[in-house]
Image (cartoon, grey):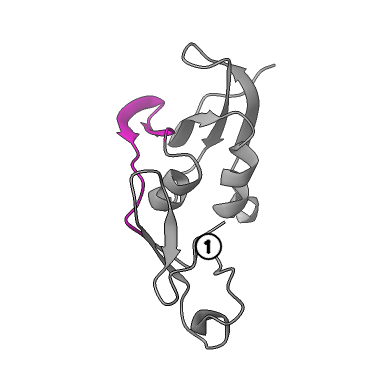
Amino acid sequence: MNIDAIENGYVIDHIPSGKGMRVYEILNLSSLTCQVAIITNAKSKKNEAKDIIKINDLIDLDLDVIAYVAPEATVNVIRNSQRVEKRKLSMPKELKDVIKCPNPRCICNNEPISHIFKLTDELGTYRCLYCETKAK
C-alpha cells in the first residue's frame, strides 16, 4: 500500500482500531476537497492495531470532537512535509452540538437551542446541561 506523504496538513494517529470512521464522520471530512486517507487496523507498537487519518490541508480541526471520540489519539501538524507539532488530546469539559440529548422531553430537543453536554467524572461521562441525562 502506498499513501503519499502529507505536505501541509494533519495526521491523526493512535485512534483506537474501529473508531477511525467515526472520527471521519463526526469531523465531516467527506465534505473536504483535499486528499484524506483513512488507514484502518494499522500495526501499532502500543496496541495490536490502530486507525490513522491523514488530511492533506491545514483546515480548522475541532480537537475537542476528536478527543471525545478517541481521547488517546494524537494530532501531528505537518508543514513543508515535516512534523512541526504533536498535540496530545484530553477529554473536553464541554461539548456543544456534538452529541444529541437522548431525552425526548429535554428542552434542547424541543426548542431551537444548542445541545450542550458537560464532562461529569473521570470516566468520561457526559451529561446534558439542561436535563442531566447521560450521553450514550
Q: Residue at point 35% right, 56% down?
A: 120
Residue 67 visible to the viewer: yes
Q: Quadrant of residue 31?
A: bottom right
State the residue in front, 71 or 8: 71
Q: Amino acid at mark 1?
A: Ile
Residue 96 location in percent, x, y?
42, 66
Residue 58 visible to the viewer: no
Q: Which residues are magenta?
A: 72-94
Residue 3 location in percent, x, y?
62, 23
For residue 131, above or below residue 117? below
Q: Secondary structure at mark 1?
A: loop
Q: Quadrant of residue 110?
A: bottom right
For residue 121, above or below residue 105? above
Q: Residue at point 62% right, 51% down?
A: 25
What quarter of the picture does the C terminus occupy? bottom right
| Circle 1 crowding by C-alpha within 10 Å: few under 14, some 14–19, many from 20 | some
Please give the residue where the numbered disc 1 appears in the rendered image.
99
State the residue in front, 26 or 5: 26
For residue 116, above or below residue 125? below
Q: Residue at point 42% right, 44% down?
A: 67
Residue 26 location in percent, x, y?
57, 53
Q: Is residue 32 left or right of residue 132?
A: right
What quarter of the picture does the N terminus occupy? top right
Q: Is residue 107 magenta?
A: no
Q: Residue at point 59% right, 68% down?
A: 102
Dominant SS type (magenta): strand
Q: Is residue 87 magenta?
A: yes
